Amino acid sequence: MHYFTILLLAIVQGLAELLPVSSSAHVIMAEKFMGIDPTTPSMTLLLVMLHTGTMLAVIVYFWRSWKTTYFSSWQSFWHQSWLAALATGATGVIGLLLLKLIPRVLGEPKNFEIEQIFGNTHLIAASLATAGVLIFLSGWYCREQEGTSTLTPLRALIIGAVQGLCLPFRGFSRSGATISSALIMDMARRPAEEFSFVLAVILTPPVIAREVLRISHHQPTPHLSTWLMPSLFGMVMSFVAGLVALRWLSQWLEHGRWHYFGVYCLVAAALIGLGH
């Protein structure tokens, strides 16, 4: 794959990751537009590495705020860690259940891998539409007033479960769904955003490890090393793009424009559905 192609995909990822519009759906559609199969092991590895770059951008961007919220004291750290662990546990349970359920619903063989549905444009369109409705409703609900509720164990479990529902479906924006769920539960915008991206930072490393192991079982080590360097380049470029875009993108949530993202998702879903 040409490095210029990887650069384009990294820019798409970096710009879309902080928007609740499913960066993976945008990257997959960009791959299809370029004539690239998004279900191949090399492309799924690249997609994971692009997410890694934007994850690092999130850490850099939120670090000062997280020091105040999560690392101000040991008591605060353990309390917030407990809530994040509850949410991540719920994500794992729901995600594993879906991994078992989806092949049965689709009537797929035992060796079915979830990555095989990543290129299904009809499923991407349906997932985008679902995310769009959720984002629009939550944005409309909270546009006039700031939420006042705090993050409780029950709310953390619900947000984590919603995140688990997003994992298998490209187009069902993880950040869009988790932040929208928090807003519907009357959480303030900034804490909802921060907690959503804390969960993303926790979730990304095991996803990367799983993907590398999956690819190493399918391909010999020399091929893996050949894919790794372009993917690392993509990771760096998505990190830079994410940092450039992050301040502007996060302001849309904080200034009551959240529901516009829902409208965008619905329009994008209609274009993808009609185009395929």
Image (spheres, rainbow, N blue to C red):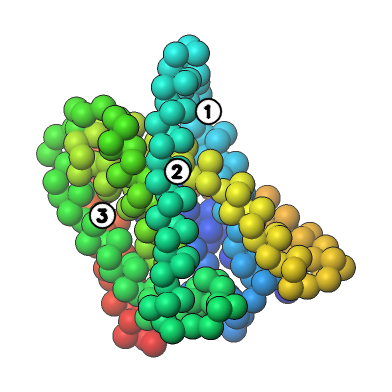
- Residue at 12% across / 39% down in the picture? 144
On-image quarter of the C terminus: bottom left
Q: Position of residue 246 (x, y in %)?
A: 47, 43
Q: Residues within 10 Å of mark 3 (few under 14, many from 20)?
A: many
Q: Which mark is residue 106?
A: none
Label 2 belongs to which residue? 89
On-image quarter of the N terminus: bottom right
SS at badge 3: helix
SS at badge 2: helix
Q: Residues within 10 Å of mark 1 (few under 14, many from 20)?
A: some
Q: Amino acid at mark 2?
A: Gly
Q: Position of residue 181 (x, y in %)?
A: 27, 46
Q: Position of residue 30 (x, y in %)?
A: 52, 73
266 or 102: which is nearer to us? Answer: 102
Q: Which mark is residue 63?
A: 1
Q: Amino acid at mark 3?
A: Ile
CA–CA distance in space, label 2 to label 3: 24 Å
Q: Earlier in the sequence, mark 1 or mark 3?
A: 1
Side of 90 where 5 appears, left or right: right
Q: Which mark is residue 135?
A: 3
SS at badge 1: helix
Q: Is residue 170 visible?
A: no
Between disc 2 and disc 1, the foreground one is 2
Between disc 2 and disc 3, the foreground one is 2
